[in-house]
Amino acid sequence: MKRLILSVPFLALTLFVAASCSSGKKSSNDPGKRSRTTGAAYAKKEGEGFRVADFKGQPAGPNMVFIEGGRFVMGTLEEDVMYSRDNIDRTVTVSSFYMDETEIANLDYLEYLYAVSRDSTREFYAAALPDTTVWAHEMSFNDQYVDQYLRYPGFRSYPVVGVSWVQANDYCKWRSAVVNREMYAKYGGKGEKKTLSFGRKKKGAEEVADNTPQVTGRVPIETGINLPDFRLPTEAEWEYAAKATIGTLSVDENYDNRIYPWDGSSLRRAKGKARGEMQANYKRGRGDYAGIAGRLNDKYQITAPVYEYYPNDFGLYNMAGNVNEWVYDLYRPNSYRDFNDLNPIRRSDYQDEEKNYDNANYNSLINNRVRVYKGGSWNDVAYWLSPGTRRFLDQDSSTATIGFRCAMISVGSAGKRKL
């Protein structure tokens, strides 16, 4: 009897070790009920010990499409008619990420303005307003767009324009806060008070303007509920998503590089019921914005609704034409030489300093405030519709031909579940 009692602890230890060693391979989505390395059981409730939350993969944010990363040739595939030599082709690899399937529309931006007007300083609200005068020109009658384009209900689904790079970034910060607030309310609220503020902070009795959205009551990152921040896509991400060479794969890793976000060198559809229709909203030639009444080509004199035309092979709309789009990168003509070949980006003037361009003496337009935009617009000829082309503009400037869409990193397991 004594020997049996002595064997009980040994038996318990044996069962503990066996349980910890026989559970098979673990994964991020299925870590098991016990620690892989200690065999200790994970806690089932908060406060009872180390708890591992259920995880089914990163949710796809609203309006977001999953872009599977890979290798591609970044740069122009056409003759460099501008002789800029700033987009020489180079092979790079981009990690998987998410991107808006459409450009940010007027209605989306009006939602942002409404939120800012209710919880922000007057100064910040004024700074967030798009510049509607970008439509105005002394020699062009565009008064209807100056007065109506942003707010008239008929333009709700048209891309917002007159937005600077700085304003686009502020929108991304606000969107990150709002989406994660909704995530918190859905998955982690439990009756706690949730607040969201943006555009202001209070210091004593003084209200201080601040363009960084703040959200309280946000669930811990370990839960997998929070989404990463929305942001502007990098130039490499944008170009990779636009070319969508995933649709040209043949045998093994062979694929065709594309001049445009679709197959072939024509801007009209070559097959099917839509044969002959324009595949993008652009300026066909001098003075020709839409064709002849009764036989219109791209149908729109200015911008088109964000879901107009066919999506590319990643499911993204208007990656050529309609409006150019801001990307994150600072502009430098030699970025293609300096880029890392994995997830390239130019955040600053590292290795290509501002002083090299003598902007202060007006010998160059290049400084540390100019940002890249890509894609071509309703007011551009076909050359600029090629994803490899690039132009730049001051980050505080805006035009009637530039809009934006957001991107987001893909973290860990490449899950694609919806919110």
Image (tube, rainbow, N blue to C red):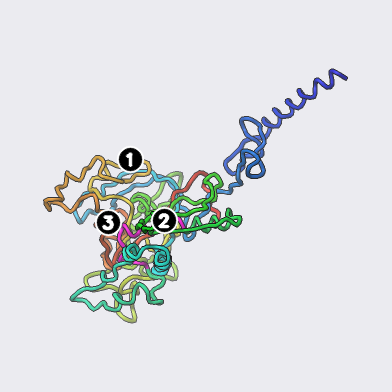
SS at mark 1 in the image? loop
Q: Is residue 339 above or below residue 138?
A: above
Magenta range is 159-177
Q: Residue 16: horizontal and vertical position, in percent?
A: 71, 29
The residue furthest right is 1
Q: Is residue 271 left or right of residue 15?
A: left
Query: Label for residue 248?
Result: none
The answer to whether any part of residue 29 appears in the image is yes
Q: Which quarter of the figure has residue 130?
A: bottom left
Sequence-wise, which precedes: disc 3 or disc 1?
1
Q: Is residue 243 above or below residue 42?
A: below
**Label 1 sits on residue:** 340
Q: Amino acid at mark 1?
A: Asn
Residue at mark 2 to residue at mark 1: CA–CA distance = 31 Å
- Tag in front: 2 or 3: 2
**Label 2 sits on residue:** 213
Tell me whether circle 3 and circle 1 mark residues in contact (CB < 8 Å): no
Q: Principal SS element in the magenta part?
A: helix
- Tag in front: 2 or 1: 2
Sequence-wise, which precedes: disc 2 or disc 3?
2
Residue at mark 3 to residue at mark 1: CA–CA distance = 24 Å
